[in-house]
Image (cartoon, rainbow, N blue to C red):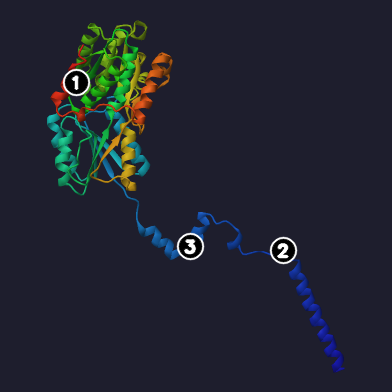
C-alpha cells in the first residue's frame, strides 16, 4: 500500500512539472524595457532620482536683465527705430525687460538723463548710440558702474571700450554706401548726384566716403553735391532746403543719410515728378520704401528707389549672442559689414521692378566684388585727419 502511494505521488509531481514547463514555453518572451525601448526626455525625467531632480531645479535660475535704451527720439523710421526693434526682440526672446527713454533733441540734457537712469536702480544693461555726445557720456560712466553692462552702437571702427563691462558695435556702412553710390551714378543721366548727411559726424562721413568711391568707380567724372544737417532728429525743413539746391544745380539722384529728416528730400523728388521725370531718392538705415509704403505718407515711397540699410536691430541680437557664447568678450568692438549681411542695399520688389536690369547687374557685380574683398572700400576712419577727408571729398564737388 505504501509502495502504491509513493508511485501515485511521484506521478503527480511529474505531471505538474510538465504543465509548468509547457506554460513557460508557450508564452512570448518579454525582454527588459531598458534594452529595447527608446527613452524620451520625459521618460528620463521620470526615472531620475527625485533628490537629484530637486537639486537640478535649484541649481541655477535663468539669468535675467533689465535693459534701458537711451536715445534721442523714436519714430525716425531709421536707425533709432531699427535698434529699438532689435532690443525688444532680444528682450522677448530671453525673457528680459526693456524700456526706451527718449531724451529729445537737446544734447545738453543727455548727461543728466543718463545719470538718472544709472542711479535709478531699475536697469543693469544700458544701450545707446554714438551720436551727439552720447558716446562720450557712456564712456565716462561705464567704468564707474562695473556692476552694469553697456553697449554703444554705431561706433567708429577705431573705438576702444574704456572698461571691460562695455562693448562697441561698429558697422562698415561705407560698404553699403559704396553700393548706393554705384546705384546713384548708374541711374544718373546728368552726371550729377548728391548726398545729404544728418550731421558732420565721423560715422556719417564714413557713409559719404563709401558713396563717393562707389559713384566714382562707375563714373570717374561724376559730380557729387554734399550737404550736412545740424544733427537734429527729424529736421526735414533743412533737408528739403539743402537738397533742393542740389536738384536746382543739376542733380537727379540724391542719397539721404539723414533718417527722420529724409521726408524733406522725398518731398522734393515728388515735386520734381519722381521717376517719370528722371529723379530718384535713396533712403538710409531701414528699407525706407517699405516703411513709408505702410505709413501715413505712402506717396513718399514712390520716389525711393532703394535704401542703404544698416541692420542695427539684428546686430544687437547677434552681439548679445556672441557675448553669451564666449565668441566675443566685454571690452571688444564688434564689426558688422556687407559680408555679414549687416549692410547693403534694400532689394525689395519696388527696386526690382523699377531699376533697369543693366543697373541691377552692375550693382550685383560690385556687391560681389566688395563682399569677396576684391574691392576694398575706403573708410573715413582710414584718413589721417579730417582735413585729409575734406580733400578727398572736394575732388567730387559739383
Q: Is residue 57 left or right of residue 71?
A: right
Is 206 or 29 nearer to us in this picture?
206
Q: Which mark is residue 342?
A: none
Marks 2 and 3 in Cβ contact (< 8 Å) = no
Q: Residues within 10 Å of mark 2 (few under 14, many from 20)?
A: few
Q: Of the residues tagged 1 and 3, which is closer to the observer?
A: 1
In the rendered view of the protein, which quadrant contains the C terminus? top left
Q: Secondary structure at mark 1?
A: helix
Is 244 or 215 nearer to us in this picture?
215
The answer to whether residue 228 of the structure is visible from this angle is no
Q: CA distance from mark 1 to mark 2?
A: 89 Å
Q: Of the residues tagged 1 and 2, which is closer to the observer?
A: 1
Among the two numbered marks 1 and 3 on one chain, the one whose residue lies closer to the N terminus: 3
Task: Identify the residue position indicated by label 2 in the image.
Answer: 28
The answer to whether residue 125 of the structure is visible from this angle is yes
In the rendered image, the vertical position of residue 20 relative to residue 274, given as above or below: below
Is 258 or 368 nearer to us in this picture?
368
Q: Residues within 10 Å of mark 1 (few under 14, many from 20)?
A: some
Q: Residues within 10 Å of mark 3 (few under 14, many from 20)?
A: few
State the image coordinates of residue 306 (x, y, percent, origin top left): 35, 19
Among the two numbered marks 1 and 2 on one chain, the one whose residue lies closer to the N terminus: 2
Residue beneath the point at 37% across and 59% down: 58
Task: Identify the residue position indicated by label 3 in the image.
Answer: 48
Which quadrant of the structure image shows residue 291?
top left
Q: Which mark is residue 392?
A: 1
Among the two numbered marks 2 and 3 on one chain, the one whose residue lies closer to the N terminus: 2
Q: CA distance from mark 1 to mark 3?
A: 70 Å
Residue occupying the far front of the picture: 374
Q: CA distance from mark 2 to mark 3?
A: 30 Å
In the rendered image, the vertical position of residue 211 relative to residue 31, given as above or below: above
State the image coordinates of residue 309 (x, y, percent, origin top left): 32, 26
Q: Secondary structure at mark 3?
A: loop
Amino acid at each position: 500500500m505504501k509502495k502504491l502511494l509513493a508511485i501515485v505521488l511521484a506521478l503527480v509531481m511529474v505531471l505538474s512539472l510538465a504543465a509548468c514547463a509547457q506554460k513557460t514555453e508557450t508564452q512570448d518572451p518579454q525582454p527588459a524595457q531598458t534594452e529595447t525601448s527608446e527613452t524620451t526626455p520625459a521618460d528620463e525625467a521620470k526615472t531620475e532620482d527625485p533628490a537629484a531632480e530637486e537639486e537640478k531645479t535649484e541649481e541655477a535660475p535663468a539669468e535675467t536683465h533689465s535693459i534701458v535704451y537711451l536715445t534721442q527720439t523714436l519714430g525716425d523710421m531709421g536707425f533709432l527705430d531699427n535698434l529699438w526693434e532689435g532690443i525688444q526682440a532680444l528682450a522677448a526672446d530671453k525673457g528680459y525687460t526693456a524700456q526706451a527713454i527718449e531724451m529729445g533733441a537737446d544734447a545738453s540734457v543727455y548727461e543728466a538723463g543718463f545719470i538718472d537712469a544709472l542711479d535709478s536702480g531699475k536697469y543693469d544693461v544700458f544701450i545707446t548710440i554714438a551720436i551727439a555726445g552720447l558716446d562720450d557720456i557712456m564712456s565716462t560712466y561705464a567704468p564707474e558702474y562695473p556692476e552694469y553692462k553697456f553697449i554703444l552702437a554705431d561706433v567708429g571702427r577705431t573705438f576702444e571700450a574704456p572698461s571691460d563691462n562695455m562693448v562697441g558695435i561698429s558697422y562698415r556702412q561705407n560698404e553699403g554706401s559704396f553700393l548706393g553710390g554705384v546705384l546713384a551714378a548708374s541711374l544718373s543721366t546728368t552726371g550729377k548726384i548728391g548726398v545729404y548727411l544728418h550731421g558732420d559726424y565721423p560715422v556719417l562721413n564714413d557713409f559719404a566716403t563709401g558713396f563717393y568711391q562707389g559713384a566714382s568707380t562707375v563714373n570717374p567724372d561724376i559730380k557729387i553735391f554734399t550737404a550736412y544737417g545740424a544733427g537734429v532728429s527729424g529736421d526735414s525743413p533743412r533737408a528739403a532746403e539743402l537738397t533742393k539746391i542740389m536738384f536746382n544745380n543739376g542733380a537727379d539722384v540724391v542719397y539721404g543719410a539723414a533718417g527722420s529728416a529724409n521726408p524733406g528730400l522725398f518731398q522734393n523728388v515728388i515735386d520734381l515728378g519722381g521717376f517719370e521725370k528722371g529723379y530718384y531718392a535713396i533712403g538710409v538705415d531701414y528699407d525706407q520704401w517699405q516703411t513709408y509704403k505702410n505709413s501715413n505718407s505712402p506717396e513718399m515711397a514712390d520716389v525711393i528707389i532703394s535704401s542703404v540699410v544698416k541692420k542695427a536691430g539684428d546686430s544687437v541680437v547677434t552681439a548679445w549672442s556672441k557675448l553669451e557664447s564666449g565668441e566675443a568678450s566685454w571690452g571688444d568692438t564688434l564689426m558688422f559689414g556687407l559680408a555679414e549681411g549687416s549692410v547693403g542695399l534694400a532689394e525689395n520688389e519696388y527696386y526690382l521692378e523699377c531699376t533697369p536690369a543693366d543697373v541691377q547687374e552692375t550693382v550685383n557685380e560690385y556687391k560681389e566684388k566688395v563682399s569677396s574683398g576684391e574691392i576694398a572700400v575706403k573708410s573715413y576712419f582710414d584718413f589721417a585727419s579730417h582735413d585729409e577727408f575734406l580733400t578727398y571729398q572736394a575732388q567730387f564737388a559739383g
